[in-house]
Amino acid sequence: MNKLSSLDLLIIVLYLMLMLVIGLFFKKKVKEASDYYLAGRNLGTFVILATVCASIIGGGAMIGRGGVTCSRGMVAVLLGLPYLLGMYIFSSISGRIQKVGRLYDISSIPDLMAYRFGSRAKYLSAAIIAFTMMATVGTQITATATILKTTGGFSYNAGAWIAALIFISYTVFSGLYGVVYTDVVQFVILLLFMYILLPVISLVKIGGTGELFRSVPPEMLKIQLTPQIIGWIFTSLVFTLAGRLFASAGYSGKVWHCGCGHTCTCYDSSSQGYYGTHSGRTSGCFNVFG
């Protein structure tokens, strides 16, 4: 096991402390239940983008799909397609999700099921979501524990306990505010260090893309679908479309305000655009989050 240097340990501690500080900072914004569960229905475009992306390219991508890439090669690229497809679908219906949530005071998928199909559907969907979320949260805890163990200085159990305490703490402090704004920080860190700097530094150390492709076994560059890979793709697509991530992001989106200073009443027009009416006129607007 590699030993952590003092600087490494300081960075990890500062990062974990930052997550707690964010949760405590946004605690003051929680005045009522809708603030806690939906961040006051006031999340902007970039915040929703960041929380969705951070959830998709977080621990599961670094540890899970990264491991598949290492062991199976280029075929792992296909595992990202369900998330890409899911985000395109979400962007086309998110305005409607936000509108329905505000119109009928719906804040979650179980609420929507209750409104449309009755209380039995509500409890069934809540149970399914609770069951799947155990796996989702478990994945994040496992990823964090694995990173702390791999970098050295922490046992796997200690890393898991640290991750669980941090996640629970900032969620308890400020609800969805804490979740999404810690996601924003994590998104920026992931984008800058894991998806920009790390590939660049790795290519420099290897000697360029030519040397990279020469050193990789030819079979690792072939995309060969197997039943297991197809199963992973299908599961990821179902999870992306049916998971609570996109629904909660849509319900938490803020109302669009036009240039006149009035709040426009937006409605969905064949899922292509949204229009606001004010001062007796109809004005066109494009806002993917309604």
Image: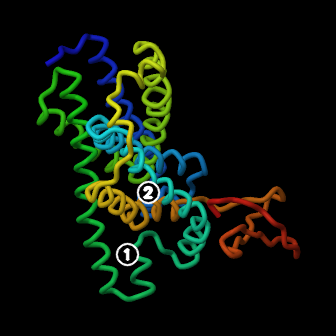
Quadrant of the drawing holding the C terminus: bottom right
Which marked residue is nearer to the observer: mark 2 or mark 1?
Answer: 2
Identify the residue at horizontal 28%, vertical 79% (top origin).
124
Q: What quarter of the picture does the N terminus occupy?
A: top left
Is the residue 95 above or below the residue 122 in the image?
above
Binning the other alpha carbons within 10 Å of mark 2 as few (below 14), some (14 to 19) or many (20 upward) gives some
Q: Amino acid at mark 2?
A: Pro
- Residues 236 and 43: in front is 236
Q: CA distance from mark 2 to mark 1?
A: 24 Å
- Read off the residue under disc 2: 82
Classify residue 158 by image quadrant.
top left
Q: Amino acid at mark 1?
A: Pro
- The secondary element bearing badge 2 is classed as helix
Badge 1 marks a residue whose secondary structure is helix
Residue 110 shows which numbered tag?
A: 1
Could you say which is closer to the camera, residue 53 or residue 213? 213
| Residue 114 against residue 276 in the figure, above or below | below
In the image, 257 versus 141, the foreground residue is 141
Q: Is residue 71 left or right of residue 113?
A: left
Give residue 58's quadrant in the image.
top left
Residue 68 in percent (x, y) is at: 29, 42
Residue 272 horizontal side relative to residue 252, left or right = right
Mark 1 crowd level (few <14, some 14–19, many ≥20, 10 Å Cα): many
